[in-house]
Image (tube, rainbow, N blue to C red):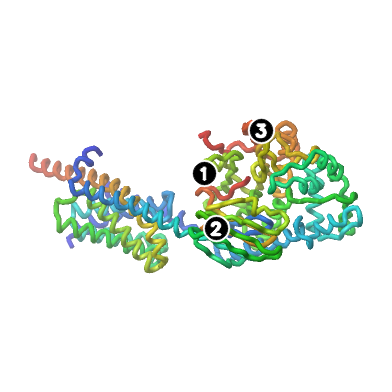
């Protein structure tokens, strides 16, 4: 009988549907204020306790690392390097040594477009008081900015800045590095997928409970209202993404936008882009190269991206979005569908 | 109960179960919000075959669905059970006491309304116990329930009409022979 | 479909109208009630220390490792008016009516609504 058949297939359909629904893995998310910003960790786990404890472990790893490289704390290892600039070498912990080595690597690759010794210039620009330093002040401090004057001794685990007055500022690389550390801690705790987001520096690993990659929104550099906060969406798994934008810390003066992403060569804010997002496997490189490419602009910047095998989304100074071919099928620009 | 009735309850329950399962697969924009598709079957059963059949179908659907998903006697089951029984009872009461005042759409609205009222009350006493939270979400849930209620009512109306037409045709065929 | 709509009784239609009007009115009333229920929570050194309703103007002084910070609530908005930490990013952030202000050197977090920022539904994280 026809009806009977329909009824039986209806019940079967229900059983099949409900069996794929009985997924025991869920996502757990916690947010904490660390490293001068918000850190959000999302993990996929079959137990809330396990999720909680591994997230807490990751938070304390980030906090510990943040204390080592805090530019503003007198007690950090970074401050100790800066205070002893031109005087003597300073012994540091392996993480501090490692991140400085990676900073030098990015500086070399980018021909100095990223430079961790930009500290003296950053100190001149006060984005809180919205005053522009004088050209003379900037010119006076430019010779202090040069990553080649960082001396590392791996055997003794020491760092030395050659010139007095030099200042290391790891703000353009530390959050990405901390995201990598956190992912390592989570993996050791038996977590196979999740997201670590330290402000805009994000590292995704594994897949969501529904087997799909993570969805990351890219902020619109010129947001007008609540509805256009996101300019693009990208699907990520086992990759990191970081964005540098001229809209994070800035002031407007005489119609010109002065923001915190300084070109280490000129001492002035770089004006070739509005925002740069870099997608690569390690958070530390996504973070530092996003600053470098921002300073270089679309031409040399995208060349660097291709040479180093990364992917990028660059929004240039006229608002045009450039994306590398590797993002095909994973990137969705808002308003284009 | 006659054999004919048992057979009918079984088939109606199977349909209701299928719709229930289909619905649980649909993505829900807001947790708690459901289309209540299975209510279409309850409504058809009520109008065509009476209150007893409708209540049986509801009970079988709610209990079997929770056994299949492994939530039997759990919190989701309590909500589903309370909502289902209460809304079927409300629809039945109105249908029997005020015959012909409400059509399927009106009955569906009553069902949706009391389904939500029952669930919100249960949620308050069993899980949330924060009156502000319940009061804030109630209007939204009731509004969405009203909209899905209208849609389900229209579908039920069409179904009932078609089933009645088929029966009439059958009778006519018998007469012609 | 058209026939089904034509088939509705007067009682059906009145009931529909009543339910829609009632729930929309309820949504507005509840929405108004909720916006008044917003709180400003001040966390010091990771621990929630004070909670104030956002609709009552006041000025609070809290102390951290870098000395006192002054938090001001006015016109359903909140800002950090004064602080002695070196970068003063929190003062620069200005007035907010939702979300949060972090002043990390001084270990002070001011949260409005208790939820922090909620990104759009289907997005897991935002970069930028």
Circle 3 is placed at which residue position?
A: A317
Chain of the residue that carries numbered disc 1 in the rendered image? A
> Who's the residue at 68% across and 61% down the image?
C106
Tell me how far mark 3 sits from mark 1, CA to CA: 22 Å
Q: Are marks 1 and 2 in contact (CB under 8 Å)?
A: no
Q: Residues within 10 Å of mark 3 (few under 14, many from 20)?
A: some
> Who's the residue at 40% across and 53% down the image?
B24
- C3 horizontally vs A280: left or right: left
Q: Residues within 10 Å of mark 1 (few under 14, many from 20)?
A: few
Decide: is A285 above or below A270: below
Circle 1 is placed at which residue position?
A: A226
Chain of the residue that carries numbered disc 2 in the rendered image? C
Q: Are marks 3 and 1 in contact (CB under 8 Å)?
A: no
Marks 3 and 1 belong to one chain: yes
Residue nearest the observer in this picture, C35 or A236: C35
The secondary structure type at the circle numbered 1 is: helix
């Amino acid at each position: 009988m026809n009806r009977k058949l329909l009824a039986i297939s209806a019940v079967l359909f229900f059983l099949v549907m409900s069996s794929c629904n009985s997924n025991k893995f869920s996502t757990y998310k916690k947010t904490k204020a660390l490293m001068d910003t918000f850190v959000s960790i999302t993990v996929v786990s079959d137990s809330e306790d396990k999720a909680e404890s591994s997230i807490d472990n990751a938070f304390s790893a980030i906090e510990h690392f943040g204390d080592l490289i805090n530019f503003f704390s007198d007690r950090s290892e970074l401050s100790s390097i800066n205070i002893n600039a031109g005087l003597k070498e300073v012994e540091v912990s392996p993480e501090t040594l490692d991140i400085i080595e990676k900073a030098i690597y990015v500086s070399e690759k980018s021909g100095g477009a990223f430079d961790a010794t930009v500290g003296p210039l950053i100190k001149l620009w006060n984005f809180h008081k919205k005053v522009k330093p004088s050209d003379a002040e900037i010119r006076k401090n430019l010779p202090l900015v040069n990553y080649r004057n960082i001396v590392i001794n791996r055997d003794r685990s020491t760092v030395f800045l050659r010139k007095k007055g030099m200042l290391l500022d790891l703000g353009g690389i530390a959050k990405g590095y901390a995201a990598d550390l956190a992912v390592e801690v989570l993996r050791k705790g038996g977590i196979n997928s999740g997201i670590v987001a330290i402000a805009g520096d994000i590292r995704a690993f594994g897949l969501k409970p529904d087997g799909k990659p993570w969805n990351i929104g890219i902020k619109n550099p010129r947001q007008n209202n609540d509805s256009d906060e996101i300019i693009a969406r990208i699907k990520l798994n086992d990759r990191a993404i970081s964005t540098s934008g001229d809209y994070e810390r800035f002031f407007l003066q005489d119609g010109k936008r002065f923001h915190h992403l300084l070109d280490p060569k000129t001492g002035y804010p770089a004006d070739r882009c509005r925002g740069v997002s870099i997608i690569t496997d390690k958070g530390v490189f996504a973070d530092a190269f996003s600053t470098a490419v921002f300073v270089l602009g679309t031409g040399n910047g995208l060349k660097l991206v291709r040479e180093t095998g990364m992917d990028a989304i660059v929004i240039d100074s006229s608002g045009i979005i450039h994306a590398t071919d590797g993002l095909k099928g994973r990137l969705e620009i808002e308003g284009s569908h | 109960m006659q054999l004919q009735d048992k057979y009918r309850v079984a088939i109606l329950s199977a349909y209701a179960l299928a719709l229930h399962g289909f619905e649980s697969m649909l993505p829900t924009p807001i947790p708690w919000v459901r289309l209540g598709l299975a209510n279409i079957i309850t409504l058809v059963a009520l109008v065509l075959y009476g209150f007893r059949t409708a209540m049986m179908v509801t009970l079988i659907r709610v209990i079997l669905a929770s056994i299949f998903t492994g939530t039997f006697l759990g919190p989701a089951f309590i909500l589903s059970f309370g909502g289902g029984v209460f809304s079927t009872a409300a629809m039945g009461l109105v249908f029997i006491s005020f015959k012909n005042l409400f059509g399927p759409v009106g009955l569906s609205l009553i069902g949706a309304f009391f389904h939500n009222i029952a669930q919100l009350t249960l949620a308050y006493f069993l899980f949330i116990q924060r009156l502000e939270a319940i009061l804030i979400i109630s209007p939204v849930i009731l509004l969405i329930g009203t909209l899905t209620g209208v849609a389900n009512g229209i579908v039920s109306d069409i179904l009932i009409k078609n089933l009645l037409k088929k029966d009439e045709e059958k009778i006519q065929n018998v007469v012609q022979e | 479909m058209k026939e089904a709509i034509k088939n509705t009784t007067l009682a059906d239609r009145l009931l529909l109208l009543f339910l829609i009007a009632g729930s929309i009115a309820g949504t507005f009333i509840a929405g108004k009630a909720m916006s008044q229920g917003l709180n400003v929570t001040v966390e010091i050194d990771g621990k929630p220390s004070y909670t104030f309703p956002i609709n009552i103007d006041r000025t609070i002084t809290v102390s951290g490792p870098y000395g006192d910070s002054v938090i001001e609530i006015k016109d359903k908005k909140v800002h950090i008016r004064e602080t002695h930490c070196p970068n003063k990013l929190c003062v620069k952030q200005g007035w907010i009516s939702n979300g949060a202000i972090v002043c990390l050197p001084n270990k002070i977090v001011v949260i409005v609504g208790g939820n922090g920022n909620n990104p759009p539904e289907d997005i897991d994280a935002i970069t930028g």
